[in-house]
Amino acid sequence: MQFEFATATRIVFGAGAVGQVGAYAKQFGRRALVVTGGHPQRGQKLLDNLSAAEIHPVVYSVAGEPEISTIENGVALAWKENCEFVVSFGGGSVMDAGKAIAAMMTNEGELLDYLEIVGRGRSLKKRSAPLITIPTTAGTGTEVTRNAVLASPQHKVKVSLRSPLMLARLAVIDPELTYALPPALTASTGGDALTQLIEPFVCLRANPMTDGFCTEGIQRAARSLREAVLDGQNKSAREDMAVASLLGGLALANAGLGAVHGFAGSIGGRFPAPHGAVCAALLPHVMAANIRALRERAPDSFAVRRYDRVAQLLTGNPNATADAGVEWVQKLVSDLPVPKLGAYGIGAEHVAEIVAAAANASSMKANPIVLTPDELAQTLRLAL
Ligand SMILES: [Zn+2]
């Protein structure tokens, strides 16, 4: 057995925790680039908190998914305003934008030097500028991961800037920030969280540390995802989903993912479909395909028993076997306000192209068994 584990330097969790950010942030300097989403006023409490701690916030609003220019403009603003550190406050896209900006504030050259696929793929040399991540959704776990996903529309792909040097100095997870999330967004981000707990648990690089996070997180998501969608003000459900999201991030960054995320990367680069909704739509079908392929070609694989365990954690029945887990997830996804992939314009005519790109995705390499192109195509068709 060999593994390593790396994460944010410090993780602070709790309802109202955002009110402590100023006190923690003082050590990083007096001027912060605050990266937010399309509605910066949602971060007013954070901005007030920083100001009260005598930190001057320079707001950089990022609407939609970050592209290369988004990062370049953010770095230019940080330099012009003499910012010493970065605070990312928002959903997954905002987290990733802040991560990439913080990395490019300290590393020489241009962003393309360091991007996979579309760029020169060099390794970052220097630790990022100090970064504080504060997620306002519960799903991506990207506050504790070491990569930033950027869109490159002209290449029809999403690419990652990736390095352990990008890990945040401080991640603040405050479930209160998610109370106002509408049901559809709660469902799609929560579907991502559940996927990011199941895939690392059955993947080829699973390890004892991430296993613990996954089993705890799967139970919390199983008991609270529906409830958080039905009643956004349910504090314990929101807290469970914030924990599940965090644990999923810790797990995926230190183990790996699987075919759902292999597909999601390929689809996300081609269609305007929210990542979490794509994951939720695919999850039961990928689970079923993996279980079938494992039984046929690798019946002694650890992953077969892992899928039994997933079923037991989801259903609460200690005797459940893998198929019951698939059924449980299928029922959950059909109950949630998450559309199938056809709703985003994805049709049978796109299957071959998506499968070809997904087969080469880095997430696919951790899937517990290699799925054939036919199996991948069949799986995708079921999610359309
Ligand atoms: Zn995901």
Image (tube, helix red, strand yellow):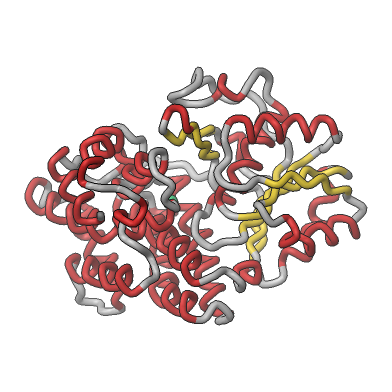
Q: Quadrant of residue 365?
A: top left
- Against 353, residue 199 (above or below) is below
Residue at the image position 69 percent from the left and 36 percent from the top? 102
- Please, is residue 194 above or below residue 167 in the view? below
Look at the image and tell me in which quarter the N terminus lies.
Answer: top left
* Residue 99 horizontal/vertical position (percent): 63, 40
- Nearer to me, 78 or 133: 78
Q: Residue furthest left?
A: 296
Q: Residue at x 27, y 45 (%)?
A: 367
Locate residue 370, reporting x and y percent: 20, 40
- The residue at the point 27 percent across, 73 percent down is 331
Q: Position of residue 3 (x, y in %)?
A: 42, 42
Whether residue 199 sits left or right of residue 68 in the image: it is left
Taking the spot 24% from the left edge, 38% from the top edge, the residue there is 355
Could you tell whether 19 is left or right of 54 in the image? Answer: left
Give the vertical position of 315 relative to 119 (above or below).
below
